[in-house]
Amino acid sequence: MTRDKTLANVRNIGIMAHIDAGKTTVTERILFYSGRSHKLGEVHDGQATMDWMVQEQERGITITSAATTCEWKGARISVIDTPGHVDFTMEVERSLRVLDGAISLFCAVGGVQPQSETVWRQSEKHSVPKISFINKMDRIGADFFRVVQSIQDELGGHAVPVVIPMGEGEQFQGLIDLVAMQALLYREETQGVQWEAVPIPEPWADMAALWRRNLLEKCAEQDMATLDAFVERDDLTEDEIWRALRKATCARAIVPVFCGSAFKNKGIQHLLDGIVRLLPSPDDLPPVICTRNPDNQRKVDENEVFAALAFKIMSDKHMGKITYLRVYSGALESGATVWNSAQESFERVGRIMRMHANRQEPLERAVAGDIVAVCGLANTRTGETLCTKDEPIYLQPIEFPAPVIGVSIKPSSRGDSDKLSKALRRLADEDPTFTVMLDKETEETVISGMGELHLEIIVDRLRREFGVMADVGRPEVAYRETATCAADGAYKHVKQSGGRGQYAHVVMTLEPLGPGEGFEFCDEITGGRIPSEYIPSCEKGVIDAMAAGPYAGYPVVDMLVRLTDGSYHDVDSSDFAFRTAARQAFKELFRKTAPQLLEPVMAVEIDTPEEFLGAVNGSLCQRRGRIENIGDRGQLKQIKGMVPLGEMFGYANTLRSLTQGRATFTMQFEHYEAVPFALAEDIAKRRRAEGKMR
């Protein structure tokens, strides 16, 4: 059995945007107009196909990326609808890692918003070609050309409109197709399925001519043949325009811009045309390269040796663990045995499925270019490569941000203890930004994630999906400890209690590194003062100590540790003794480095009516916030600032009270910075009082 579509007719795309820009509504229209679904599902009434989780339907937001497949004009389009909330940006990261192209969605009123910038940067990191769709052209305050300019100014994207709107807000009537130079009027009685192509009305003729000229000039810049044709005729054919646009889009030289109103059923069919005509197919992309051996490349060809990347894991109460794969080369059969190159172990593939949100369509075979889900991969984790043992390959893994907030959790009843631990393990398998840790000192289970909403969803899923009732503690910020000056000294571990003793002597120097530079261990022992076989044990001891710093019990970061001298005993020295000595030496020396507590600081943006500006500014200052800019966004005032995460718990309720529910805010992690000394001391005292210091 071979693939049902040639590679040239396959598109693997994602839809990315700020929260509430309309990603899921656009996806619903894509499914409807392509014939994949036969009714329009709406987010606001909980009927959207792609928002299948109960938590998504209740909140009206996307929480987990959902995949589906449809067809348009002979092409098969695999679509991944990604979340827009900053707490779930990990879903965008892993989706963009395996996609060939993306639709960058913008609200015609909000324009480029904070999460718009985040997902744009993520797509640039993975070199994903994009087209843009400016949605909600029917909303009051919509401004197509302002958003186009913002894409260029704020994101650095070379935005080139392919269509322009006929009117904005309540006057939005339809589109002007700049390639065919005709107006498109949609029939509302057919839910936008039918439209009329008519001559461009006189009020729009001059504007259409101006933007058509812009489009032609951008196309002519792409290659000499197109430039020669443009210079000779002062015009280009439709085929020449589409060919130049596709070449430039795949090369990420330009970002074609479409527009419409998904909710009012206008503009989606032409967006589908743009997907098929402009975004790359799998065979337009270069071969994938092995991270450990750059010469080991795999072409996107079903006759090549098999290689696939596991990019997402989800739990299904009926089917168990489902692993999403992007097949980069070769083919995968149901029942096949594959090699996990990260774990160096075999896995057996059960069923292969093509996903439609939470519904499955069985497949006998998956080939290069496919995005599928499989059952049976019991041990495979997100970001690991599946291949053949004879010709292994290690594909670029997926990088995930570290959690910034944690809470303690315990079962409501003793009988739920085992159920809770199993459920937490399954959720941690699904979500690499969700971690579970047992604090041995307090015997508390601590779960950590990307924000309050992230952990709220986790607890809700425990109750609904796994039937586990849990008591949750107060949120804890993921503080860090670091040094501010160098220190050196020695520690001698001597223990004798009958039989073989323990002896280890180490001399160390601790030095601070720059922010974000991590941990470095240097062995500067000379003359065999400590045998080489004990050096790794010393490093492990330091790492043990850094897991919970002596100042407040938080992880230590950005440290250089030099092992400069020491001594050993032929009989009593051991790996354990040197690991213990290094751990204790680090703890003692770290206290001499004037340790400093670091806290995560969030970039906050607030949109508020001007009458509440003073109250909102005051609330940020009370939370140790720094206001960096106050500007205009339409009829609202926009405040940009930096606020410590520890001060932002419950801020949504505060802002709602201050502004009568009329203001909105977003925040995302920006960096770590020092906690004021007095506050740091209070935090350390509280930690000691709670018994959380080792």
Image (cartoon, rainbow, N blue to C red):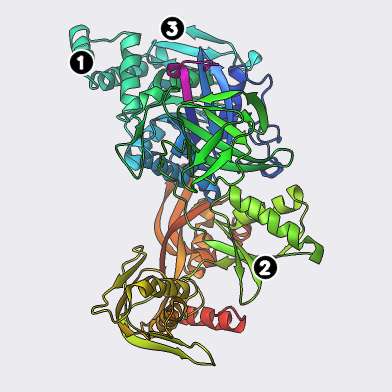
Mark 3 or 2: in front is 2
Between the C-alphas of marks 1 and 2, the distance is 65 Å
**Is the N terminus in the top left, top right, bottom left or bottom right quadrant?**
top right
Q: Mark 3 sits on what residue?
A: 199
Which numbered disc covers residue 227?
A: 1
**Residue at x 51%, y 68% (from the top left corner):** 623
Between the C-alphas of marks 3 and 1, the distance is 28 Å
Range of the magenta residues?
1-11
Quadrant position of residue 528: bottom left
In the figure, is residue 380 to the left or right of 221?
Answer: right
Mark 1 or 2: in front is 2
**Is the C terminus in the top left, top right, bottom left or bottom right quadrant?**
bottom right
The percent coordinates of residue 587 (x first, y second) are 43, 82
On screen, residue 274 above or below 255: above
Amino acid type of the residue tagged 3 in the rendering: Pro
Q: Secondary structure at mark 2?
A: loop
Q: Is residue 18 visible?
A: no
Task: Please tell me which residue lies in front, 215 or 403.
Answer: 403
On screen, residue 256 above or below 638: above
Quadrant position of residue 438: bottom right
Query: Neighbour class for label 3 at 10 Å: few (<14), some, many (≥20)?
Result: few
The percent coordinates of residue 127 (x first, y second) are 36, 36
How many marks the image carries: the answer is: 3
Between the C-alphas of marks 3 and 2, the distance is 64 Å
Amino acid type of the residue tagged 1 in the rendering: Leu
Q: Mark 2 sits on what residue?
A: 473
**Residue at x 62%, y 42% (from the top left corner):** 314
